[in-house]
Image (spheres, helix red, strand yellow):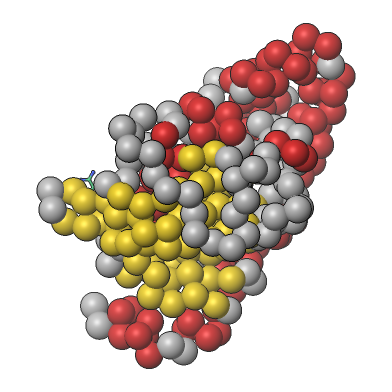
Amino acid sequence: MSPVRAPPPLHPDFHPEASIDAAGPGKLDPSHRVILYLEDITVSFDGFRALDRLTLYIDVGELRCIIGPNGAGKTTMMDVITGKTRPDSGTAFFGQTVDLTRMSEPEIARAGIGRKFQKPTVFERHTVFENLELAMKADKRARKTLFATLGDEARDRIADTLRLVRLASEAGRAAGLLSHGQKQWLEIGMLLVQEPKLLLLDEPVAGMTDEETDRTAELIVSLAGEHSLVVVEHDMAFVAQLGGKVTVLHEGSVLAEGKLESVQNDPRVVEVYLGR
Ligand SMILES: Nc1ncnc2c1ncn2[C@@H]1O[C@H](COP(=O)(O)OP(=O)(O)O)[C@@H](O)[C@H]1O
Ligand SMILES: [Mg+2]
């Protein structure tokens, strides 16, 4: 907990009297446009500013891609959102009531923010189904409300998720036997059974085949609307497939934002990418 309470976001959509859970767990609240407010976030490591007054808003149900050269601050931004790194200054709100700068990582996960790291971390000896079951049980909210009374609903949710991530035919296989791409999908499934409102994906197609990359793009596009998504990615062809708004980070702040074609033609963006 930071000793000084951060000011609420300045964005006109922010209404602190509202409740993020007006829509219930796992459901997005459509009565507000913005789900994530980052304002003036600064993170310093030994005087070096990894994030430098970063301001960024993500809309409810939006699919946003974050690009930018190595060292731009993309992973640090994810670390701030998930509570792994505390900002030195700035405001980070999830929905209308959740001040991310005052919460622990588990509290933030329970509030509905799921994060997928680059390397898949599935339980290799367990089956695909068991991995989803374990992920669901790890979610304390689900343990209380679902497993006590709604066993069938939990199984249905796992079955739906298996279909969504295209692993229904692999449900009984040990996760260790899946291809790299399938493991990545399983891990996305493990996040989905916890019904996050906001999903953060760090380079989800790294190491995938072209076909796996195409399928991952379809999966991510299909999740938008029901979830808000922030995808950090280097692969421009993949970013183009996703089709959402793109934010270019550079030296810890936003350099450009908009459709991929327009940011790609922005001379400042061209210089940052080609100037290295
Ligand atoms: N824990 C840390 N300690 C010191 N420097 C760090 C730490 N984490 C990140 N950095 C530095 O902050 C900058 C931004 O890093 P990062 O957020 O990982 O960038 P990106 O993900 O865009 O490649 C880099 O210069 C990196 O070296
Ligand atoms: Mg990174």
Decide: is 237 above or below 33: below
Q: Nearer the viewer, residue 81 or 5?
A: 5
Q: Can you name the residue that lies furthest to the left here?
A: 46
- On the image, which quarter does residue 70 sit in? bottom left
Across and down, in percent, residue 256 comes to 44, 77
Look at 33% across and 79% down and name the residue there. Answer: 273
Q: Is residue 169 visible?
A: no
Q: Nearer the viewer, residue 230 or 234?
A: 230
Across and down, in percent, residue 31 comes to 75, 53
Across and down, in percent, residue 207 comes to 47, 54
Across and down, in percent, residue 110 comes to 58, 29
Asked whether, in this view, residue 49 is left or right of residue 149, the answer is: left
Quarter of the image for the C terminus: give it: bottom left
- On the image, which quarter does residue 39 sit in? bottom left
Q: How many numbered circles does the render carry? A: 0
Decide: is 148 above or below 155: above
Quarter of the image for the N terminus: give it: top left
Q: Is residue 88 visible?
A: yes
Decide: is 208 above or below 5: below
Look at 55% across and 52% down and name the residue there. Answer: 36
Asked whether, in this view, residue 152 is left or right of residue 178, the answer is: right
- On the image, which quarter does residue 69 sit in? bottom left
Q: Can you name the residue that lies furthest to the top here?
A: 148
Look at 54% across and 77% down and name the residue there. Answer: 258
Q: Can you name the residue that lies furthest to the front here?
A: 17
